[in-house]
Each structure stands twice: as C-alpha cells, then as structure tokens.
Amino acid sequence: MPDFGADIAAYGARINAIAPAERHVANMVSAINFDIRGLDTLGEEFMLLAAITGTVVLLRGSRGEAITDRAARLPGRPVLPRAEVVVLACRIAGPITALFGLYVVLHATVTPGGGFQGGVILASATLLIYLGEGYSGWRDSVRSRWLDAMEGGGALLFVLCGLAPMLVGGAFMENVLPLGTFRDLFSGGLMLVENLGVAAAVTGGFTQLFLEFMEETREPDQSDDPKGEDA
Amino acid sequence: MSWLPYAVAAWLFGIGLFGISTSRNYIHLIGCLSVCQSATYVLLLGIGYRWDAIAPIFYDHPPGTPAVDPVMQALVLTDIVVGATLTALLLVLTLQVYKRSGTLDPERLRPMRKNAGGGRVGAQQEPGAEAQL
Amino acid sequence: MPDWFSLGWIPSAVLPPLPVALPLAMCAALLATAHLLPGRWPDILASLTALAVAALCGLIAVRAADAPLVYWFGGWTPRAGMALGIGFSVDAASGWVAAFIGTLYAASFVFAWGFFEETHGHFQILMLLFLAAMVGFVFTRDLFNLFVWFEVMSVAAFALTAYHLDESALAGALNFTVTNSLAGFLMLGGIGLIYARAGTLDFEELARAVAHAGRDPVTAGAFCLIATALMIKAAVVPFQFWLADAHAVAPSPVSVIFSGAMVSLGLFGLAKLTAVVFTGSDQVRGAVSLFMIGAGSATALVGGLMAVLQRHLKRLLAFSTISHAGIMLLGIGALSQGGTGGLLLYLVGHGLVKGALFMVAGILLATRAGIDEIALRGLGRGIGPAGIAMALGGLLLCGLPLGLLDQGTRVLQGALLDGGHPFAVAATVVGAGLTGAAVLRAAGRIFLGLGQDPGDEAQAPSEAEREKANRPLWLMLAPCLILLVLNIATPEAGVARLATKAAPAFMHQGGSLGAGPSWLPWLSLTLALVLAAYALGRHRLPRWLSRPIRVTQSGPTRLLEQVHSGLIGDYVTWITVGSAILAGLLAAS
C-alpha cells in the first residue's frame, strides 16, 4: 500500500489541477459528481429512486395501494396536545432549516454541499412540520403524489441534462452551458441544472420515505410497533 | 504508523462480519452491516488522504494549493448514498418480517424451512392428486 | 437493403449512452406521471422500452463488429494518455449480450402483462431501472461505474424479490440483501486498493498498471475482493446460498430475469475484468485457473445434486441455475479464447432456456395455483404446450444438440479439454445431466402424472404459493415459446462466425475457438434421461434394486440440504471461508 498521507493518486491530482480552470468551479467534489464523473451520480440518483420505489411498494403492499391523503387515526390512541413552546420552535426552525437546505443546494459548486446533502436537509425540514403541527397537519401539507412527481421529475431533469447536449452535437452530459465566473454562485454551467434536479428528486424521495414509514406507525392492527421511527 | 488507517478498515470489516455471522436480531445485523460499510469509508478516505493538504475546495485557497484526492471523496459520497438506500430497504424488510412472524431472530426466519423435515405439502395433497388419475 | 432501413443515418458515435439513458428517462417519467396513466400504459411503455433497448443494443453490436465503440461521457476524452471521465467501451460481444438482456426483459414484461396492475407502475419502474443498470454494467469501462451499476442492479433486485411479502419472501429477500450488500462493500474495498496502486479507474489504464506492478499483494488483494463480490452475485460455491432462497420466492417474471440475466452478469463482469484488467498479472492468472476450475466444478455438481433433491419448482430451477453458473465459471477458469467465447454463448443460450422454464413455473403458479412438484402431479394435463416447453427446456439444459446453448457447451468443453482439465469437463457433463434430470422428472410428474413414489425430494422444503390468474394462457405461453425458439433457431454458422471475431475483441487478445467432441452432450443427455426415468419409475423397480440406491443416496443428500440452512450467519461465514481460500491461492501462486 502507498504510505498513508504521502501523496495522492495521479487521477485526483490531475482533476485538482484542471477542473477550476476548465469548469470555473471551486468545489472539486461537485465537479467530479456532476461533470467529470456525472454518470456515476446519475446511477446513484436512480439507485436512490429504486430504493424509495421499492420501499413504497413493500410498505404499501401490506396496507393496500390505495393511498389516502388524510391522516389515518387510530381509535385507541390519544391525541396529545402539543406544548406551545414546541410548536413555536418548530415554526421558527422549519423555515430556517429549509432556507439552509436551499443554501446548501445552491452553493454546490463553490462550497461544500450539493443536491444530495441539501435535499436531505430540505426533507428533514418537512419533518419539523410533523413535530410542530402534528401528524394530520403534516399529511395535509405533504401530498404523496406531489412527492412522486417531484422525485420522478427531478430524476427526469437529470437524465434530460444528459440527453440535451446530444441534440446540439455534444456528448452525453457535456457541459455546454456558459460556465460563469469562478467562485460565483452561478458557476459550473450545466452542473447547476443537474444539481437542482438531484435536489428535487432527493427532497421528494426522502419525504416520501418519511411519509411511508410514518404511515406504518398508524396501522390499525399494530399495537406494539417496535420501531416506527426512521429519521 | 502509515498502516494504521488500513488496519482500522480491516478491523472494522472483520468485526462487522463477525457481528453478522453471530447476530440473533435483524436490527443488530443491519447495524453490523453498517459497520462493515464504515470500513470502506475509512479505506477510501485513507487512500485519498495527504498530509498538510486542504479539502479539495478552492474557495478560500487558490487553485494549486495541495489538496486531498477529490475522487475518493466523490466515491465516498456515492458510498454513503448506497448505505442509506440499503439501510432503508433492510429496515422495511425487517419491519414487514416482524409484522408477519413476530420475531426478529434469523434462526426462526429461515425461508421455506418452517416445517422442513417432513413430507407435509405432498403428504396432505397426495391423495387428492391420486384421485384425479 | 435500402439505406434508411439499415439505419445508416444514425451515427455510431451517439449510440452507446442511449440504451442506458432511455430506460432511465422512461422510469423517471413513469414515476412522475404514474397516477395519471390509465390501466395498461405502464405495461405498454415498459415493453416498448425494453424492445427499443434490445434493438439499440443489437445495432450497437453490429456497428461494433470491427472495432469496439468507445464513448466518453461529458466529452472528457483522455488527455496525455490519462482517462479523466467515464467511458463506455462496447465490443460486439458486450453489445449482443446487452441485446439479449433487452429481449429477455421484453419477454418478461409481456409475460407479466397486467400481473402488477395495482402497483401504479412501480413494478415497471423497478424493472426498467434493473434493465438500465444491467446495460450500463455490460458497457462500462470504468471500475467505479461498474460498481455503481452493480449496486443499482442489487437495489432494484432486493425490492423485487420481496414483492409477495409473505414470510419466506421476506426472509429470502433479507438473505439476498445482506449477502449482496456485503458483495458491494467487498467490491468497493477492492476498487480502493487497486486505485491506491494504479491511480486510475479506467480498465485499459488499470490493465497497464497491473501488468507493470507484476507480483504485488495490493493488486492481488484487489482482485480477491472484486472477484469475491462478483462470484457472490454469480452464486458460485461457496457463495451460492442466497440464490436459492431469493429465486424461489421472487415473483416468476422477476425470477426469469434473476436466473436468465442477473446471475450470469456476475460471471460476465468477472470474465471481463479477468480478461481485460488482470490479464497482465501471472499471479492472478495462476490463482484464477486453480480457483475457478475447482469452484466451477464444485458448483456444477452441488447445484445439480441440489436441483435433483428439490420439489419446489422455482427452487429446483434456482439450483439448476447455480449448476450452470458453475459450468460458465469453468469457461473463465480455462483462461483461453475458447473458454470465454463458450461462456458468452452459453450465457445467452442458458438465459433464454432458463427464462422459458421460469415462465412455465409462472404458468403453473397462475393456472394451477401451485408450485410443488409432488402436489402438482398429473395436474398439468390440459396445458400441454407448457409441458412440451418444459420438457424441451429440460432437454436443452442437459445438452440436446440444438441451438445456442449446445453450441456454447461444445465450445466450452473444447476449451477445457485443450486446457487440460478433463475433470472439469466431467463436471460439466454430470452437472448438466443432473439439472436436466431434475427438470425432466418434474415435467414428467406434473404433465404426465408419472412418478407416484417420491424419492428424497419429498423431504425438501416447499411452500404453498400461487400467483394471480388474470392473464390468458396464450399470453404467458407466447414469450416462453419465443425464448425457446430464439435459442433453437439461431443459425449456428452465423453465430460461430460472429463469435470467432467477437471473443478476441472481448478479451483484447487473439486466439481461436475450437469445439469439443460432439458425443459429450449426448452423454449428459443420456445421464439426464436415465436419472429422470429412474426417479419417475422408481416404484416399478424391484425392491432389492431400489432400496440400496435410496439408502446410499439419502445420507449425503440430507447433509447437503442441511448445509443450505437458510441462516444468514452461516452464509456470511461461508463467504469468509471462500474469500480466504481465494486469498490463500493468490498468496501461494
């Protein structure tokens, strides 16, 4: 094995050397994920989509495919009133978390972050609605079909970002958009669009995941669910 | 001590494997699987590391500053997504198993071996098949 | 032929990414709009997509006949001899394998028509993802990209396995998920090691680095980890345990894909890596020769024996797949042009036949509401064509000299004989004979009502199972028969011509394909017929003859069944043992 910490591989060194100049981005990891090795990320995105679709199939299978947009209510389970402090905290923290998620998404090409990380933060922001407004409030504001559309639409946007450059004679996922200026929010060209697609897909997907697991805790025949939590 | 990160990775993988082999609870088993996966994080990041180098983000430092290997970091990012997807799927399977059989013990959950060792299915249905002849 | 029809207007340079991008785009669109699409639309769209993928891959294969099509994603062509981005490199063999996969999916979609109607297209989404991942896996020339597609395949497969949601399906899916996740981690570890040594992920550059490194523990370790991962996928002894659990419980249209394509793709990947990346390391080649020949023979025999011992039809077919995977592994172990060429032909032929057989199992599940061979005895009367398909499939499995599978078998056996592995040839004959016997016995029992005295198979695990009977028989039979016809009717001379060019392009080195003696397949066919006849007519034999046979075979067979314990902990232990053996061989060679 190479000595730990002695030097890095030629491949990585080469990317560090050329990517800032050629793609005008400061974050090398994003440059690799969305441009140089963008196909890996496409696969990764669809791996996530497969897992979430699989989760939905396997969880819904047992309680029927008919999804309702209303919260199921368990007959015997008491509705505990929420402390006002909790509601207030969630109402303050929710938008801030969402804002932070957006920030992480948008600054993918300049600072650490990107669609995956930001998408997960955005999805957890929706969980704060659950904490603050209760289950039925959460279900009222989060609709399964919208999530499907968001997840599928985001993934579709990513694939189209790959296919569109081929229409103008480029290679699959070739960065044909203007690259912007180095260290600017709008740098990286096509990477920004791909990044948005990933963010939408991850937000939709993870929220869908939360929704399905949460719905699982509401199943009427389930009195001693050992682990309904998931986050 | 240049071998230490690699040794840690090997040890993590080994102990995770040991945990999976001896586990009597699926939740514990999924945890052990995550331990195995952490071994790959340690290995990849260890390979990509370089002393006195910055993270591969040239925002505060000009391009050209020695940085660690961004490829390995990107691979680990993918690896993390793999881990998240696997854990979600495994937890769903475990949840469903528990609902159907009321146990999380792999010893009691052998596929199709619930009533192994007898001629049950055939023995019960054989007369019916015979009558059809 | 008019120029338009020969598709000359499509430039070859744009083709390689399309068979991956098309199903991905389709499944994203399906997910986004699933709730708006009426009834059969997901079925129709999915079948058409699979057909389009098959056609595109066929076109790519034709275009790649002379030189592989190389494609660099994002326009990142190599600079100064260093690959920067991810490349696809499609040689003719890879193209044809992908075209076969597309065809198999199209057949499976037609077979499953309406079967998953209440899932809002989720089944189709998972299957299309599975398809895209397989094509990507076959085309890529980047080691990490290979891993990504490997994982996408796994994740889609895990969810599809558990679809029935009964206890066995869930337990089988858990075993499958845990073992194959471990395979993924091992592979990633291997990728890390070889990256540390070579500083690149591109196959060609890795090959140069491996050849340059010579005898090197890091390269050998990387090979050990990656090969173990792929052999777990390919269900090679001692990594095979998950397969029977998973294939037996998966819905039948999914099992068609699992046995027909997924398992053999593990071998395809292993063959590609062995031939392209690790070919320059004598240490790896030595260990490969020893381990693959040994493990392949063991797999062929164990799988065959286990298949004979089963009564649950899908489980029986699953073990038969293990046996055939072992035979294909021998092709890698032969380390020659003929071995790899035979493996590729065998892969396609076996996929077609095994796919058809799983469809017969699905027909029984739907029309006779059962999958247990003994319980179904005589109940197959009335669906004669399915019986004929099953018998034909069984005969083809054990070497009926017709079509692609037989051609692959002969090339493979020829290569093994040339390489001086007579024992391995014997293993292919016996393994194929045993699995053929198992299928023929089941066909005779179910469709002719023979074999009223069950032997050891009565002790095997089984479970009542059924699938929805909402499809007309002809709709299920048609894809099944098409697959068999495709196997039989493929012109032998054309395939031989293709293979002599394609195999060297796949392996990046010259050589020739020879065929083994033509009496060998007859030997396994005879063996299969004798064994099946014995199993079906056992009760007519005099007791002094049948009793000793039964007593002597019972002990070892019980032991084998007990080793397949269904316990995930045991499976993981076996994986450790197997990879330790491979590591030992690598260290010693």
Image: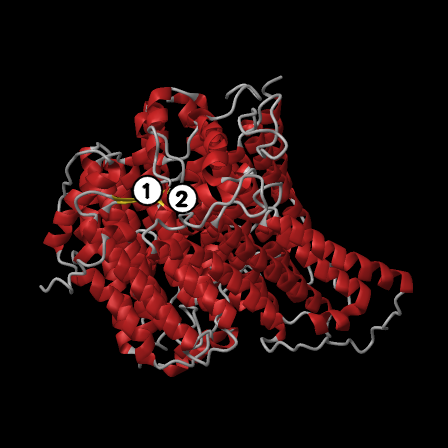
Q: Nearer the viewer, residue C129 or A130?
A: A130
Residue position for label 1: C329
Q: What is the number of the mark on residue C236? A: 2
- Estimate the x, y position of residue C532 in percent, counting from the top left: 29, 60
Which quadrant is home to the C terminus of chain A?
bottom right
Q: Amino acid at mark 1?
A: Leu
| Host chain of mark 2 | C
- Estimate the x, y position of residue C325 in percent, counting from the top left: 34, 48
Mark 1: which secondary structure?
helix
Q: Determine the residue positioned at 27% across, 77% down.
A: C384
- Estimate the x, y position of residue C186 in percent, counting from the top left: 50, 38
Q: How is the image coloured?
A: secondary structure
Residue furthest front as drawn: A181
Same chain under badges 2 and 1? The reply is yes
Crowd class of label 2 (few under 14; some 14 to 19; many from 20; radius 10 Å): many
- Estimate the x, y position of residue C217 in percent, counting from the top left: 44, 22
Q: What is the number of the mark on residue C206? A: none
Instruction: Please report whichever mark, 2 or 1, sits nearer to the chain's N-terminal start.
Output: 2
Residue A120 appearing in the image: yes
In this rendering, position of residue A23 left or right of residue C475: right
Q: How far, Cα to Cα, is label 2 from label 1?
A: 8 Å
In this rendering, position of residue C525 left or right of residue C492: right
Q: Nearer the viewer, residue B65 or C451?
A: B65
| Host chain of mark 1 | C
Residue C318 appearing in the image: no
The answer to the question of whether label 2 and label 1 lie on touching residues, with beta carbons closer than 8 A, is yes
Q: Amino acid at mark 2?
A: Val
Mark 2: which secondary structure?
loop
